[in-house]
Image: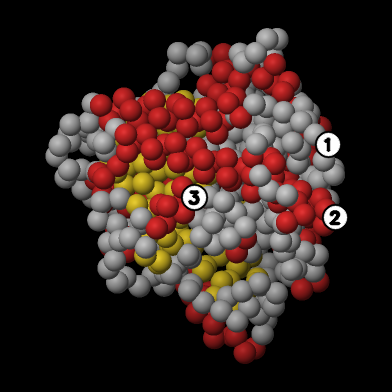
Amino acid sequence: MNKSRPNILLITSDQQRADCNGFENKNLKTPHIDRLAREGTRFSACITPNLVCQPSRSSILTGMLPLTHGVWDNGVDLDPNVGEAGFAGTLAKAGYQTGFIGKAHFSTKATFASTGTPECNKSQAKYGPDWVGPYMGFQHCELSALGHLHRTRPLEQPPVGHYERWLSSRGIDGEGIKLWAAESRPGTGAAQTWYSALPAAWHSSTWIADRAIHWLEQASASNDGDKPFCAWVSFPDPHHAFDCPEPWSLMYDPKDMVLPKHRTRDLERRPWWHKASLEGKPQLSDPVMLKFRAEGSRVPDQSDAQLAEMTANYYGMISQVDHNVGRILSAIEAAGVADNTLVIYTTDHGELLGNHGLYLKGPTPYEDLLRVTMVARGPGVTKRQLVVEPVSTLDLAATFYETAGIAKPAEMQSRSLVKLLRGGAETRDVAYSEWHLHPSRCGVALKLRTVRTKTHKCTFELESGAGELYDLVNDPAEMNNLYDDPGYAQVRKELHDMMRARPGAIVDPLTEPIGMA
């Protein structure tokens, strides 16, 4: 086999904190992700370019920051022309077999009206069971389009996505959907948390691994060195709702959970938009969409027992994903292509999980939400290496280009990680994250720019001039906002200059949202 062009396998979860792997959290069991870290390199200061799904996933695909590719919030679709010019379309033109299995979320699923994309909940009449792409540069696609089903709402008809159609066919008279929404045992009433009665064999994590293994086996069989593969396998978990099935929901006892030390809100110590985003009313005229927003992104204060149960189920979801990651790794080993495959495991963004009294995600870029897991293994990758330079999942596209021997487009802000992966010395001064919020999300419009260095992090709200600055070395819990501290004026100026030096163009005007998520 000609090994000049390695295979590329990107595996992602959804909403996984950077400290929720066995190598950072001894209370969590992720043996397969831990193995990737042992056999390769992990990044301890990798951040997401955005704090919610659609923009961050579009950045991974395109190698551009959100305000450059134009997906500045959930509910804004990635322009297909921009998406098709991302790493998947570029590698396909260079001879790679490209496939996507799982949750894409490049386009809006909960739309105000039909948009015609394969992810839109109102456009499924266009996409029958025989549709398998192409989409956003991927030649083959099998989607879990909804990603996260909604227990209190009926499944769209016809169902959105390959997995949802498949689940609807399980059992007799919609048994799969009924079991997913049913409880295997009662809980404490923790927000968006229950013990799903769905059999693990019918779960999205299992289905995604099954379909990924099938595609990878076929791609490996036809890989003679001239047709390497590039696959993105995307698990929708551990995103809320926290609803993993047995045995994973029983794997962690809530009584054993270590809760955040600072788990009460201290909004008086934070910039104004923390409080405003929690208390503002989403600006939506559609009552159904308003209910969707209120139930889907707002969590009331939880008791310690409820937070412990939420955490235990969240951990269970991660271990279930890890189990299926192990199945995929075993499949490429059995196919004889593991030694010539760059494998990267990461996620789109983190999860607040009760720290600072906050849950899920929002315009509060604490490390819980901003920092993400990223590990890599493959040909030339240094083993047992820890990289502490600030990097971003934005950098994956340029990494794949260099791995494939392709020059990256000039307009990309992505910077290749190949030198770092190979043990080379390379200084990274700053990583960027940005998010412009529409009032439909939380009732307030925001323009947030975050810069993170090895030692500090600062978020600037451009309209009001407010901000928050944390010294990550002396205050890793991010308790003391130093934005207006005279002693940190020079640090703030340096970070402000970095923010203003953000590379690349900014889309103007930005596209209005066409849906909620």
Mark 1: few/some/many CA within 10 Å (<14, 14-19, 20+): few
Q: Residue furthest top?
A: 173
| Amino acid at the residue labelled 2 | Ser
| Amino acid at the residue labelled 3 | Pro
Residue under the image location 45 percent in, 26 percent down? 211
Q: Residue furthest bottom?
A: 487
Place of residue 96 in the rendered image (x, y in percent of width and height, measured from the top left): 26, 34
Question: Disc number at residue 31?
Answer: 3
Circle 3 — which element?
helix
Question: Disc number at residue 303?
Answer: 2
Q: How far apart are the two marked residues, 1 and 3, measured between alpha carbons?
A: 29 Å
**Left or right of residue 260, residue 459 in this image:** left
Q: Is residue 134 above or below residue 191?
A: above
| Amino acid at the residue labelled 1 | Pro
**Left or right of residue 337, residue 479 in this image:** right
Place of residue 143 in the rendered image (x, y in percent of width and height, measured from the top left): 50, 27
Q: Is residue 18 visible?
A: no
Q: Is residue 367 visible?
A: yes
Q: Would you say the residues marked 3 and 2 are in contact, meaning their CB atoms lie under 8 Å apart?
A: no
In-front residue for pair 238/394: 238
Residue under the image location 42 percent in, 60 percent down? 42
Q: How far apart are the two marked residues, 3 and 2, measured between alpha carbons?
A: 31 Å
Q: Quadrant of the N terminus?
A: top left
Q: How far apart are the two marked residues, 2 and 1, measured between alpha carbons?
A: 17 Å
